Image (spheres, rainbow, N blue to C red):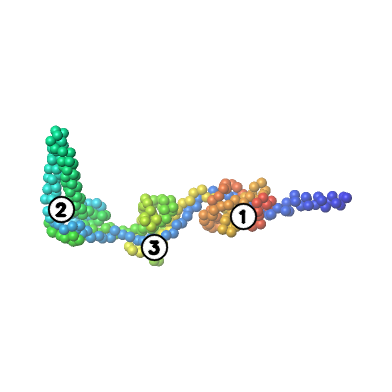
């Protein structure tokens, strides 16, 4: 009977014994910030030189800019089409006449002298005259040539010259300092900060730049334009394609040893020491560097994560923590 009691107690002893716990080592979860690198292709561009041409047939009139630099948006010249001024004067006179006729017929309608249809016809004639005058004024606006960017102006015609549509009027030479344009997915572009650091590589050249501007909306392709300022003396030429590596900051990440992450199929998890027992927590790994994994999950800094022996664990497995 005594022997029987011994064999009944023996399993209970081994169940309570630490020998049944899995020996593991642990590490403390740390707060961390993770900077993601988004790599895309970018094209080197430059304002270079542009030729401004006549938008219509006519006479080139002032104001002609003095030789030298002109600002973006400065008026380069006006093209005066033959007869446009006379047409504008006639259109303004027609508007005045139609307005007077409409007002007269409205008064006569009140006196019962004319029918309502006469007033309606006068109103239609007035609106037609206004529309014609607006169209001519719009044509007059199209006569104006403006500088699309800041640069040095060089006129190819003299004031008063008669030109046809497409005739070169002037050349505008930009400062020719190139930049890089990269098209980036919106979810990444809108997290990039203006002025942030960018690594650049292309055609045997390596360097860095800074984000100059970020588009406000996606293009038809669904990508957002990010413009990058190049170093002053870069060897890149307009038209070249280069690799662009943007730094996109991620907040609220945690740092654990890479060995703490266990893969179960396509899913990653870590085991937390919870009162001497293993508790699995699903995580998302956003990046690894120098043996440290940056993760996102329902964890807290300061908790103990198992970093060795974790492949033998399951939920609530007893832990024997070793130093």
Residue 94 occupies quadrant:
top left
Q: Earlier in the sequence, mark 1 or mark 3?
A: 3
Q: Is residue 220 left or right of residue 296?
A: left
Q: Tell me what residue is drawn at x 22 percent, y 53 percent.
A: 146
Residue at numbered disc 3: 242
Q: Characterize the local packing of mark 3: few (<14), some (14-19) or many (20 or more) Cα atoms within 10 angstroms.
A: many
Q: Earlier in the sequence, mark 1 or mark 2?
A: 2
Q: Is residue 310 visible?
A: yes
* Secondary element type, mark 3: strand
Q: Tell me what residue is drawn at x 62 percent, y 51 percent.
A: 280
Q: Is residue 196 left or right of residue 308?
A: left
* Secondary element type, mark 2: loop
Q: Characterize the local packing of mark 2: few (<14), some (14-19) or many (20 or more) Cα atoms within 10 angstroms.
A: some
* Secondary element type, mark 1: strand
Residue at numbered disc 2: 62
Q: Is residue 285 left or right of residue 186?
A: right
Residue 165 occupies quadrant:
bottom left
The percent coordinates of residue 297 (x first, y second) are 55, 50
Q: Give the camera-side residue of 142 and 101.
A: 101
The percent coordinates of residue 54 (x first, y second) are 19, 58
Q: Is residue 96 visible?
A: no
Q: Give the camera-side residue of 3 and 18.
A: 3
Q: Tell me what residue is drawn at x 12 percent, y 55 percent.
A: 82
Q: Give the camera-side residue of 220 and 46.
A: 220
**Farthest residue, direction bottom:** 204
Q: Earlier in the sequence, mark 3 or mark 2?
A: 2
Q: CA distance from mark 1 to mark 2?
A: 78 Å
Q: CA distance from mark 3 to mark 2?
A: 43 Å
Residue at numbered disc 1: 307
């Amino acid at each position: 009977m005594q022997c029987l009691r011994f064999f009944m107690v023996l399993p209970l002893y081994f169940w309570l014994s630490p020998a049944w716990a899995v020996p593991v080592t642990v590490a403390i979860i740390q707060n961390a910030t993770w900077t993601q690198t988004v790599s895309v292709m970018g094209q080197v561009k430059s304002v270079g030189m542009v030729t401004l041409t006549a938008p219509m047939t006519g006479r080139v009139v002032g104001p002609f800019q003095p030789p030298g630099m002109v600002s973006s948006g400065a008026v380069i010249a006006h093209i005066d089409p033959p007869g446009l001024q006379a047409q504008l004067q006639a259109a303004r006179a027609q508007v005045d006449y139609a307005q007077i006729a409409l007002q007269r017929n409205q008064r006569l309608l009140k006196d019962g002298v004319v029918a309502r249809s006469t007033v309606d016809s006068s109103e239609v004639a007035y609106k037609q005259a206004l529309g014609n005058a607006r169209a001519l004024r719009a044509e007059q606006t199209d006569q104006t040539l403006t500088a699309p960017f800041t640069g040095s102006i060089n006129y190819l015609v003299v004031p008063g010259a008669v030109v046809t549509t497409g005739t070169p009027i002037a050349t505008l030479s930009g400062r020719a300092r190139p930049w890089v344009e990269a098209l980036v997915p919106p979810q990444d572009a809108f997290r990039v900060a203006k002025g942030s650091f960018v690594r650049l590589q292309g055609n045997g050249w390596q360097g860095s730049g800074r984000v100059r501007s970020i588009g406000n909306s996606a293009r038809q392709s669904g990508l957002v334009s990010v413009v990058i300022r190049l170093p002053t003396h870069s060897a890149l030429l307009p038209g070249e394609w280069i690799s662009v590596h943007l730094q996109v900051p991620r907040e609220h990440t945690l740092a654990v040893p890479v060995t703490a992450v266990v893969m179960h199929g396509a899913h990653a998890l870590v085991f937390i020491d919870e009162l001497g027992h293993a508790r699995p927590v699903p995580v998302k790994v956003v990046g690894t560097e120098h043996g440290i994994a940056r993760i996102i999950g329902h964890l807290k800094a300061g908790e103990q994560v198992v970093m060795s022996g974790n492949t033998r664990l399951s939920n609530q497995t007893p832990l024997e923590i070793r130093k």
